[in-house]
Image (cartoon, rainbow, N blue to C red):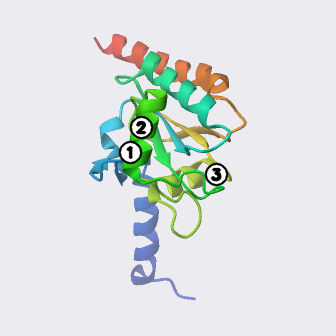
Amino acid sequence: MLLTAFTLLPLISHLVEAKQKDFYTFKVVNSRGRLVSLEKYRGSVSLAVNVASECGFTEEHYKDLQQLQRDFGPYHFNVLAFPCNQFGQQEPGSDKEIDSFVRRVYGVSFPLFSKIAVVGTGANNAFKYLTESSGKEPDWNFWKYLIDVNGKVVDAWGPTVSVKEIRPKIAELIRQIIIKRKEEL
């Protein structure tokens, strides 16, 4: 098979595009229906989580995620919550109902986005990126993806790994940001 510039061009442009992408290059809809660029979180550490309001993991995870946000955010860290109803139909409400529930019951102050699919053909592009980058695909609610300041996935954990268990890894990434910023002064 003869490869010409014409046949190689789509392949090369795809590779260049894939290389340039990171988590913060995506746009998503927030829980209030507004399109938001994840670019606004660049320079901070993020923990992207597919959340559900009626799951056995809900209470522990929401409390611990809010504690993380309280302790580390919003200048160096953000929990980014993506409601998902794909696993056990445990997130049945509307975006407005979900937003109201988690803010009222758990005092959530971190960004909450519109309900999305995280797996399958209809999966949200940001979550496709997280899955492809980490090699770990959500198979239940409360998958957690740790993302560095440049939008690269550092690690991923399923729902049986508690937020408290990954807190030291998050703290270390935040410590690195603070040290770097102090050195730049």
Q: Which secondary structure, mark 1?
A: helix
Q: Which quarter of the figure is the N terminus placed in?
A: bottom right
Kindly identify which numbered label has been placed on residue 13. none
Given the image, on which type of amino acid does mark 3 rest? Pro
Q: Which quarter of the figure is the C terminus placed in?
A: top left
Q: Which residue is mark 1?
A: 24
Kindly identify which numbered label has been placed on residue 138. 3
Given the image, on which type of amino acid does mark 2 rest? Asn
Q: Which badge, 3 or 2, comes first in the chain's sequence?
A: 3
Whether pointer 2 and pointer 1 mark residues with C-beta atoms closer than 8 Å, the reply is yes
Which of the two discs, 2 and 1, sits closer to the camera? 1
| In the rendered image, the vertical position of residue 71 relative to residue 56, given as above or below | above
Q: Which badge, 2 or 1, comes first in the chain's sequence?
A: 1
Q: Is residue 79 visible?
A: no
Q: Which badge, 1 or 3, comes first in the chain's sequence?
A: 1
Residue 44 lies left or right of residue 159; in this view the side is left
Residue 110 in picture, x, y percent from top left: 40, 32
Residue 97 in picture, x, y percent from top left: 41, 47
Given the image, on which type of amino acid does mark 1 rest? Tyr
Q: Which secondary structure, mark 2?
A: loop
* Mark pair 3, 2: CA separation: 22 Å
| In the rendered image, the vertical position of residue 87 relative to residue 57, given as above or below | below
Whether pointer 3 and pointer 2 mark residues with C-beta atoms closer than 8 Å, the reply is no
